[in-house]
Amino acid sequence: MQTNAIKAAVTALKNNEIIGLPTETVYGLAGNAYSEIAVEKIFTLKNRPHFNPLIVHIKSATALTLVAKNIPLVAVQLADTFWPGPLTLVLEKQDHIPDLVTGGKNTVGVRVPNHPVALELLEQLDFPLAAPSANPFGSISPTTAKHVVDYFTDSLTIVLDGGSCDKGIESTIVGFENGQAILYRQGSTKVEDIEKITGPLQIRVHANNESVVAPGMLSKHYAPSTTTILTSDITSIIQKYSDKRIGVLQLSPTNLPSFVIAIETLSQTGNLEEAAKNLYAAMHRLDHQNLDFIIAQKMPAVGMGLAINDKLERAATT
Ligand code: TXA
Ligand code: MG
């Protein structure tokens, strides 16, 4: 598969260049995690504050000890259960992981991506890949190669095309404090599934700025530039805006009045996994329509609905 493209990516990465990388969650901006030169380039491209650490991508659970140490048993169980897959574990870092990757923390976020292109690439490298989502800091994450190209036309020479991301929202992030598993970020691995192994997860309340453990926790993130309103009751909210250019982001089909200019329906059957997969692409499309407002519907608070609501709350202006 794509042998030439992967070969070119291997060469670029060995030369400390940054590439666009497909994963099952969202596309990443990937570089050699052991190279400060490469990692600095990622921060610059993303315009990301240096205190925000990057996730390190490894090829298999057996490579975990190369980047992390003193790994709690429950973390090993989570890795065995969910990798490759959309679960990031925050663990004590090995000394050779640059401080730049971890935002100066002594912990590192690590996961094995579940995407054939990412895995094939990692297999051919003798270093792991640091990769944040491939969007400028604070904006909507990319779920297609085109989203990445649109964001970084002038600055990326290689964006590997792995199709539309299967999961569509970022990995779930779990850390460990005093032997207790803690949820740092909602994401594509369901909390209910993680809790089957960890027992009830402590959840870090949404924090701001200096107390932020993960930027995914910043209250304004994943945001379209269009003013976005999150509501459980689309029908009554849209009446207030009948003289505006509005777009609606909804879970499943409903009858909407004709003054609604743009309608994005995330799943014909109301399936929350499908909705997650379609979420960011729908937000990208709505954001390109010169709307006055995006009215987004709150999802049912179960399964992937919780993670979608978390992203929508951070996208919403009010
Ligand atoms: O699905 C994903 O996780 C995607 C794909 C590309 O793998 N990546 C991603 O990266 O979402 P990014 O940089 O957009 O978000 C990484 C999150 C940040 O919120 C960061 O703070 C957190 O991971 N993180 C990384 N290392 C951490 C650490 N040592 N302690 C706490 N949080 C950490
Ligand atoms: Mg991100």
Image: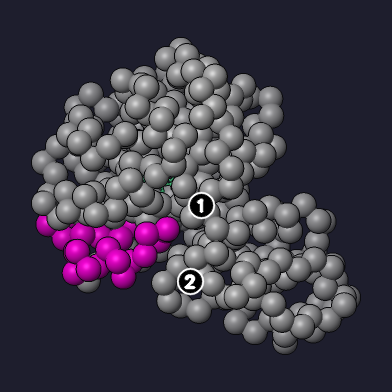
- Residues at marks 2 and 1 touching, judged by CB atoms closer than 8 Å: no
Q: Which mark is residue 166?
A: 1
Q: Which residue is mark 2?
A: 305
Q: Is residue 72 left or right of 311 when viewed as pictured?
A: left
Hey, which residue is sitting farthest front in the picture? 1
Q: Which one is closest to the eye, mark 2 or mark 1?
A: 1
111 in relation to 166, above or below: above
Amino acid beneath label 2: Gly
Looking at the rendering, the stretch of residues picked out in magenta corresponds to: 177-199
Amino acid beneath label 1: Asp
Q: What is the crowding at mark 2: few (fewer than 14 residues within 10 Å), some, or many (at least 20)?
A: many
What SS does tag 2 mark?
A: helix
Query: Which quadrant of the figure contains the C terminus?
Result: bottom right
- Residue located at (30% from left, 60% from top): 183
Residue 183 part of the magenta-drawn span: yes
Task: Please provide percent x and percent y for residue 263.
Answer: 76, 68
Q: Is residue 49 left or right of 318 when viewed as pictured?
A: left
